[in-house]
Amino acid sequence: MGYDRNLPYNALPLLPPMIEIERDIDILRKLVSASRALATVNSSVLRLPNPFMLVNTIALQEAKTSTEIENIFTTDDELYKAISDTIQEKNANTATKEVLRYREAMWEGHRLINEQNRIDRDCIISIFRQVKNAAGGFRSPQSQTMIKRGQSEFRSGETIYTPPRGVGLIEKLVDNWLDYINDDEKYPLDPLLKMCVSHYQFEAIHPFQDGNGRTGRILNLLYLVNKGLLAQPTLYLSKYIILHKDDYYFTLGAVTQRGSWKEWILFMLDAVENTSLLTNNLINEIVNQMNATLEYGKSKLKWYNKEINELIFSQPYLKPRMLIRRSSRTTLARYMNDLMNAKILVSQKDGKEVYYLNQDLIRILEG
């Protein structure tokens, strides 16, 4: 193909790819198993008393792992503290704030797509701005953006890809990308396969100076939601990618260098299948533990009920006022002592702050 990674890839082909993806028997087999696994996630979500519980559990884990792919790390402890209290969130370290912005970007995109029933330029830019906490937009034509190997990698600093650049070029490529994912009559490809293709294309366009990987992974989930394949944007896709990071970047680069779409699509379908099974197991474990805790709590505490139980499983670290909002300080203290004596929660002190931890939920999320 004559591709030179040191030069802008202005010859990036428009979508759709010039191959017959749906006629490949290996891809079709993997598509069936991936679709079947994804369907189990939706049925599991329906078992939850409130699907938005996943915002501070699985969605938060997705946000944390997606930022780790970009070498931005925070601890579960810092993250759980930040979401339990607005003051702690404000004072969180930079990496923790990056994770929380990812989560907020995902839900902002979810809101926009629900309103418009499609992904458009404004949606993409809004997600990017939330991820990066910036006011910018697409890269300028003169921007000398290059993707280089990280300092910890072999041949660090080496250019591995130079995205397209030029007046109006990014806008043209993005508009083609949007047309491809939104027009199912013009491009009648199975949505899972279309997600695989569109994710490569978005990363190859690299429309922003930074934050393209996180923005692209959010768009994957939102696209699956928009097409009715996922009830909530809570698929734990980034964990599979970070566990197979070398394969992810190798197959991504192989499309650019050799037009090897098959290996890339098989990798992405495998990611969806394995991630679906993982997410399904997480949901089932959470639901089973919730039921067991509810039964145990009611047997130990006269005031324990389903509403309190659901709040206790809404996030790993809790503050008393999140659980029992209209009680006096004395009553609140008694309730928290009851929960600790029953070993439903344990306390952890951090300076002047006291957190109440749901260790069963933490065990499931970090397992």
Image (cartoon, rainbow, N blue to C red):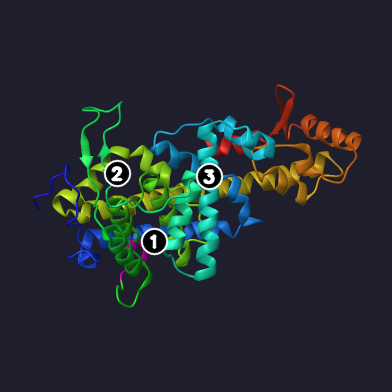
Residue 89, percent from left and from top: 63, 37
User: Which amino acid does the dot numbered 2 rest on?
Assistant: Tyr
Q: Nearer the viewer, residue 208 or 236?
A: 208
* Residue bearing the label numbered 2: 248
| First in sequence: mark 2 vs mark 3 | 3
- Above or below, 109 against 180 in this view is above
Q: Main secondary structure of the magenta part?
A: helix
Task: Report which quarter residue 297 is drawn in.
Answer: top right
Residue with the most extreme left position? 2
Q: Examine the structure image and report whether residue 192 is included in the region drawn in magenta.
A: yes
* Residue bearing the label numbered 3: 101
Say which of marks 2 and 3 sits in front.
Answer: 3
Q: Is residue 174 left or right of residue 58?
A: left
Q: Examine the structure image and report whether residue 173 is included in the region drawn in magenta.
A: no
| First in sequence: mark 2 vs mark 1 | 1
Helix, strand or loop under label 3: helix
Helix, strand or loop under label 1: helix
| First in sequence: mark 3 vs mark 1 | 1
Q: Label 1 crowding class (10 Å Cα cut-off): few <14, some 14-19, many 20+? A: some
For image coordinates 50% across by 51% down, the residue present is 280
Give the spatial CA distance, label 2 vs label 3. Answer: 24 Å
For image coordinates 25% across by 65% down, the residue present is 15
User: Which amino acid does the dot numbered 3 rest on?
Assistant: Arg
Give the spatial CA distance, label 3 vs label 1. Answer: 30 Å
For image coordinates 29% across by 44% down, the residue present is 248
Residues marked 2 and 3 touching at CB (< 8 Å): no
Q: Label 3 crowding class (10 Å Cα cut-off): few <14, some 14-19, many 20+? A: many
Q: Which residues are magenta?
A: 189-194
Does the rendering let one see residue 256? Answer: yes
User: Which amino acid does the dot numbered 1 rest on?
Assistant: Ser
* Residue bearing the label numbered 1: 35
Give the spatial CA distance, label 2 vs label 1. Answer: 20 Å
